[in-house]
Each structure stands twice: as structure tokens, then as C-alpha cells.
Amino acid sequence: MTTTDERTPTLPRHVGVVMDGNRRWARRNGLSNPSEGHRRGADHVEDLLGWCEARRIDHLTVYVLSADNIRKRDGAEVGFLFDLVCDVLPGIVERSGHWTLHVSGEVALLPERAADALRRAEVTTAGRAAHLTLAIAYDGRADIAAGIRGAIRAGALGADGALDPDAVTAHLPGGPVKDIDLVIRTSGEQRLSGFVPWQAAHAEVHVSPKLWPDFDEVDLDAALARYAAVRTG
């Protein structure tokens, strides 16, 4: 069996995924309620975890819900998303037996029931081999600000007022490996929507035309192949 330390240097250590296109998928499939697309998208995270485990990718960050969406989207739709956060995603991670859950975002924006479910899953999955960070109620600028505050509180600010960027990285939420090598965005949108701007500063970006619920194992391999071609070219 290939161990993590024996991985090919062209395989990304940490992959970030922007799961976009759930509502469009629902419309395209004749579903009047966009929440059905969100449900399919949430369930599809389980497939992604299995694919990454099979490829020895042990660090994964998935963009679930932005803080901006919570503030601006229809209340019923956001309420359904909260239900998925509470009832679906923690269970997927717990069942995997392989992934340690980390949460990045303004958890205070979530209903207490959803926040509690995520906290319990973080505890019950702690110590597993791989690390999954769910970006929920997430804002990229707030994430960076939190990392800077954490670094300063830890005494990383020098006498000259300089702050080591590595200290900021170390104080960002998420798993032990912060820097992201490859970002995959589905649905064809050519933007990152504020997704982990600090951690993805040096990442390759692959945009798939597939809507997230239609994104499959072949599409993942295409993204990995493109990453390998760029890094070895």
C-alpha cells in the first residue's frame, strides 16, 4: 500500500472545493424547490470523501455556505441549508471513519442546533488519519483577520511591529495543513467567491463546467491531471 509519505509529488496534498451549482441542478432536473439541489449536493460530499481517500489525499477543505449567503438568501432556503448542516454533513464525516472534522467560519451565525451538531462531530472524529475542513458561515476576510488576531495574541508580533506570515497561517482555523495546492470550482464560474484567500494564495485553480451534483470521479481525475501537468511543466 502506498503511504502518504510515498505520494507522487504531482498529487496535491490539500484540495479545496467550491461546490457550486446546486440550485441550477435542481432547475435543470425539473425540480421546483432549489432545496432538492442542496440536498443532493450535501449527499454528494460523501462521494468526494471516498474519492479523496482512495487517492491518498488527506487534506480537504469544502466551501459549504458563506456568511454572505446567510445574510442575503431567502429565509426558507437558508433554513433548509441549516438543516443539512445539522442533519447531513456531520453524519457523513462520522460514518467515514477516516476524516477528522474541522469547521471554519462564523459559527455564531448558525442556529444553536446546527452549531452543536458540528461541535459534537469535531469531538467524535478527532484523531483520525485525514482532515476535512467545512467552510460554513464563512467569510475570507474575517478568516484572515482571525488569523492575525490569533498570531498577535500568541506573541508573534515583533518589536519592530512586523508579523511573520507563517504565524498568521498557523493561527487560521482548519486542519494541520493550511496551504491549499489545488482549488476546484464547479458550475463553470470563473471566480473564487472569497474562498480561503490566504490558504489558496499559491494554489492552482481548476474550473469544471459540471454542476456540483453532476461532478464525478472522472472530473476529479481531470482536475488532478491538470494540476500534475502544470506542476511538472
Image (cartoon, grey):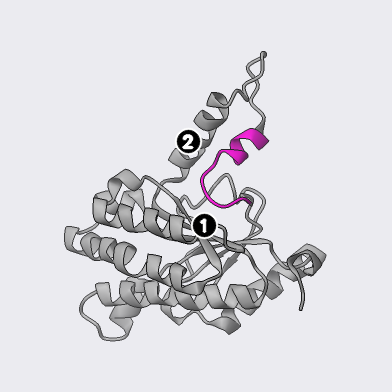
- What SS does tag 1 mark? loop
Q: Give whichever of 54, 180 is nearer the camera.
A: 54
Q: Does 122 appear above or below 197? A: below
Pick whichever of labels 1 and 2 is earlier in the sequence: 1
Which residue is labeled 2 in the image? 146
Numbered mark located on residue 126 in the image: 1
Looking at the image, residue 92 sits to the left or right of residue 150; the answer is left
Looking at the image, residue 102 sits to the left or right of residue 12; the answer is left
Disc 1 crowd, CA 10 A, few/some/many (<14, 14-19, 20+): some
Quarter holding the N terminus is bottom right
Query: What residue type is disc 1 on?
Result: Ala
Q: Is residue 30 visible?
A: yes
Q: Give the range drawn in magenta.
A: 166-176
Q: How many labels does the image show?
A: 2
Q: Does 128 appear above or below 166? A: below
Label 1 and label 2: CA atoms lie apart by 22 Å
Q: Position of residue 96 (x, y in %)?
A: 50, 73
Name the outermost residue toward the top. Answer: 159
Q: Where is residue 201 in the image (x, y as percent from the top left)?
A: 62, 48
Name the outermost residue toward the left. Answer: 76
Looking at the image, residue 106 sits to the left or right of residue 180; the answer is left
